[in-house]
Image: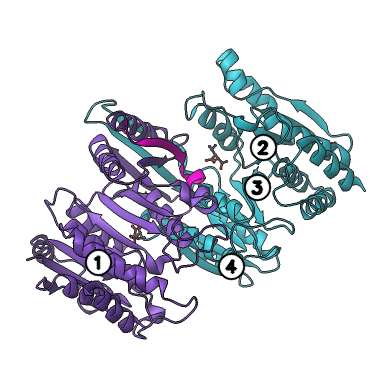
Chain colours: A cyan, B purple
Amino acid sequence: MARIAVVAGDGIGPEVVGQARKVLDAVLPGIEATEYDLGAARWHRTGEVLPDSVLDELAGHDAILLGAVGDPTVPPGVLERGLLLKLRFAFDQYVNLRPSRLWPGVTSPLAAVKPGEVDLVVVREGTEGLYAGAGGSLHRGTPAEVATEESLNTRHGVERVIRDAFARAGRRERRKVTLVHKTNVLTHAGSLWSRAFAEVAAEHPDVTTEYQHVDAAAMFLVTNPSRYDVVVTDNLFGDILTDIAAAVTGGIGLAASGCINPEGRYPSMFEPVHGSAPDIAGKGVADPVAAVLSAALLLDQLGHAEAAARVGAAVAAELAGRTPGAPVRTEEVGDRLAAHAVA
Amino acid sequence: MARIAVVAGDGIGPEVVGQARKVLDAVLPGIEATEYDLGAARWHRTGEVLPDSVLDELAGHDAILLGAVGDPTVPPGVLERGLLLKLRFAFDQYVNLRPSRLWPGVTSPLAAVKPGEVDLVVVREGTEGLYAGAGGSLHRGTPAEVATEESLNTRHGVERVIRDAFARAGRRERRKVTLVHKTNVLTHAGSLWSRAFAEVAAEHPDVTTEYQHVDAAAMFLVTNPSRYDVVVTDNLFGDILTDIAAAVTGGIGLAASGCINPEGRYPSMFEPVHGSAPDIAGKGVADPVAAVLSAALLLDQLGHAEAAARVGAAVAAELAGRTPGAPVRTEEVGDRLAAHAVA
Ligand SMILES: CC(C)[C@H](C(=O)O)[C@@H](O)C(=O)O
Ligand SMILES: CC(C)[C@H](C(=O)O)[C@@H](O)C(=O)O
């Protein structure tokens, strides 16, 4: 039976993760879940972010379900670098998977887009690029200060995520992969990405390919999001593009993600894209759909495709039944989703 | 009388620049314009991108009006690094100014946004960051290849563009500046930007400030673009955000930009954000509005605020009179704008 680690985290994290667990327990009874107290609250209390012993324990699980970590009083970077990115890097979660679908019942802010028309997945590289933590500063706090951030890209890292994108595209109906980069300015990394992409593409004659600069892709996600099927891109571009994709498909409250180590050498991690939203925490009004969809990605990754599909169907029914603008009650949504997923 | 250098460039560049010059000549008779043959065509013919002698000649002008350079057969980076970025850096054009307005008569792809509701300007840093050209690769073409791109940020460069943003905000109605960065991941550069921002903000108690991560800003530009007044950000984030801003305000066909050296030590450069659009080049159907609005920014920068305002009014009348979806005739639009701007 699957053993998962649960990091509910801060703010609305525990509320939405509670519903995700409810749904998981419903569709796959007997999951063994262990809770880990990590995030802003623990940092405030103990000064600890992610002790090595906890990292070791997490490594022993099949997957990690994460709610949200952070609050505005923690200095920027402490939990991001020390916890979220630490896990993504330590567990070699090089596929940061972010599907975006415009579900029936959900209104896009885009006037011309109808439900069903947008169904894309961004395969965001998760272990390289500007997220590597390579950078520094000199003469800090003086007029002579200089600060650098370095994007590190390896053939190894680039090729493996591109391969994953092509494999996913091959299993989808439209079989199309768009590479997004900024090859005209970031010529060194751009050339590496372009060449690796062209070589992997040559092995997949059945998959259509295109290339777009990141600025153009950001624009097309607004003017014509339905043109995308699978998008593969680097860590930072993926961060930005997936928030746009979330926005045009009804908002970050519905956006799920998986930080995946496809080989299963390390646990993969599943988390809603939204943050801890301290302003609405504890009120029972956070939408748990993103967390529940993240749990569906978890099920899929652990080989429970049928259970994942039942969760997807429950979400579809939930969203189709919503009245636009009506308030969400976190617990009630969780109850409905769990009930529907087992029915 | 103003002496401007004109780089019409490739594709639709000459067509749209032709209209911009028509309008300039109408509102400010006697402008001395010298044409420079630069871009893909010259590169194909001679292998030259930007000879030093031409750079020296350009330096002797009051401003540069640029159409668009590039075509799909030029390798990525050649004209971008060798011409566009070369000019931005050589002429220390550190304020890359990109206003976005939803003009009456223009339909936003966003259902909820009405004309007049969006009126923002992005002050994009133009001479630093990932555009510095710092990067390289090792073991190219082998499985061991590594490629880097480095973002270089100086207190000097960051502070001056933030100062410009606050000065602009002080002259606007809402007086608000949003800093956009990714301080939670790019902690070194992020800290430099945040501290410089806080210090300049302290000198402007009349200006409201906020901070957003770039992923959140990309999302809010879609869900609530009217919240922005002045946005200040780094070179790459500005590249992406301005394309989103253009998309939500009716498209890149209307987006103007100025690469400005505010002190006037070097010429500033004005260019539509769109590219050379080879697919529609020579057909007389390119929308010259972005080029004409870029010419208005040029007029403003050279101290002809009244003439700039007349061009703005002509554009407003033109756009208000358009039938959505009706084709554009480049020459006719130019004629109407010129006639209206002098009336
Ligand atoms: C919190 C932050 C480190 C993270 C990222 O930039 O990857 C978040 O924005 C995300 O998209 O998961
Ligand atoms: C062509 C390219 C170098 C340029 C940039 O990235 O700045 C363009 O996208 C722009 O926004 O002016």
Q: Disc 2, disc 4: CB below 8 Å?
A: no
Looking at the rendered structure, the secondary structure element under dot 3 is loop
C-alpha span from label 2 to label 4: 34 Å
At label 4, the amino acid type is Arg
Which residue position is annotated with label 2?
A266
Sequence-first tag of 2 and 4: 4
Mark 4 and mark 3, same subunit? yes
* Residue at 74%, 41% in the rendered image: A328
Which residue position is annotated with label 3?
A255
Q: Is residue A13 left or right of residue B182?
A: right
Residue B213 inside the magenta-drawn segment: yes
Marking on residue B310: 1
Mark 4 and mark 1, same subunit? no
C-alpha span from label 1 to label 3: 46 Å
At label 1, the amino acid type is Arg
* Residue at 64%, 32% in the rendered image: A280
Which residue position is annotated with label 4?
A227
Label 2: how many Cα within 10 Å (few below 14, some 14–19, many 20+) = some
Mark 2 and mark 4, same subunit? yes
Question: Which is in the foreground here, disc 1 or disc 2?
Answer: 1
